[in-house]
Image (spheres, helix red, strand yellow):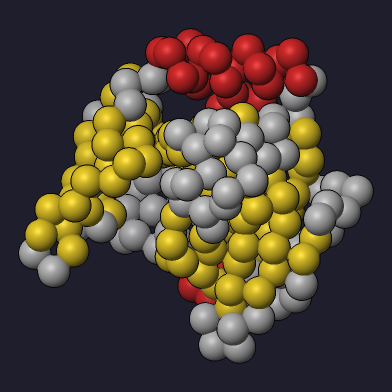
Amino acid sequence: MDLFNPHSDETTNLLPKDGTVHYYGKLFSREEANRYLDILLQSIEWKNDEAIIFGKLILTKRKVAWYGNSSFEYTYSNTTKKALSWTKELLELKKIIEEKTGEIFNSCLLNLYHSGDEGMAWHSDAEKDLKKNGAIGSVSFGAERKFAFKHKETKEVVSLILEHGSLLVMKDETQTHWLHRLPPTKTTTKPRVNLTFRFIVS
């Protein structure tokens, strides 16, 4: 099922079962979103992501950064990251997202996709460090990109477009029953910055 794009109603669950996903649409004006995009591109300590696959260290074109309340560690793809201290803008965004959703977050994993050539394969965010069935608040700045969910058993797919300055929230059993991905696309050469606010259980 493709949702391109419904009038965003944040009370509507986009998943038909086994999880909860709310799309809030654009939270920021174009001017605000452009300002945050520029600041994040320049101020974040971006590094190429690392993954160990079949014992081999792989570097991705996509860049990442990890920030949080303290220097706790977060392990995924068999590599461990230590959180950096929040920047002023990240704290601003965290407060906005928490007030909008009623959720509490203590960390943020950021992704930088330089163009539509870069994406993310099917996966779920089910690392043991994450609060089980907790909320993940995903904020997008930059190029509008398709985002898809696939049920692990039925293979049913739900897709939508994530807009510049928008918020998507995944919670409850979503990570247990659904995979998600950001497919590559030839339709854009512009960068996208994605912030995924999370709660790490220390």
Residue most toward the left? 55
Q: Quadrant of residue 48?
A: top left
* Residue 166 position within the rendered picture, expressed as x and y whole percent measured from the top left: 70, 36
Q: Nearer the viewer, residue 120 or 20?
A: 120
Q: Residue at x 39, y 20 (%)?
A: 44
Q: From this viewpoint, is residue 105 visible?
A: no
Query: Split into 4 quadrants, where in the image is the N terminus?
Result: bottom right
* Residue 139 position within the rendered picture, expressed as x and y whole percent measured from the top left: 60, 37
Q: Quadrant of residue 49?
A: top left
Position of residue 61 relative to residue 35, above or below, is below
Q: From this viewpoint, is residue 130 visible?
A: yes
Position of residue 148 relative to residue 60, above or below, is below
Q: Is 87 displayed left or right of 46 in the figure?
A: right
Q: How many marks?
A: 0
Residue most toward the front? 186
Q: Nearer the viewer, residue 66 or 171?
A: 66
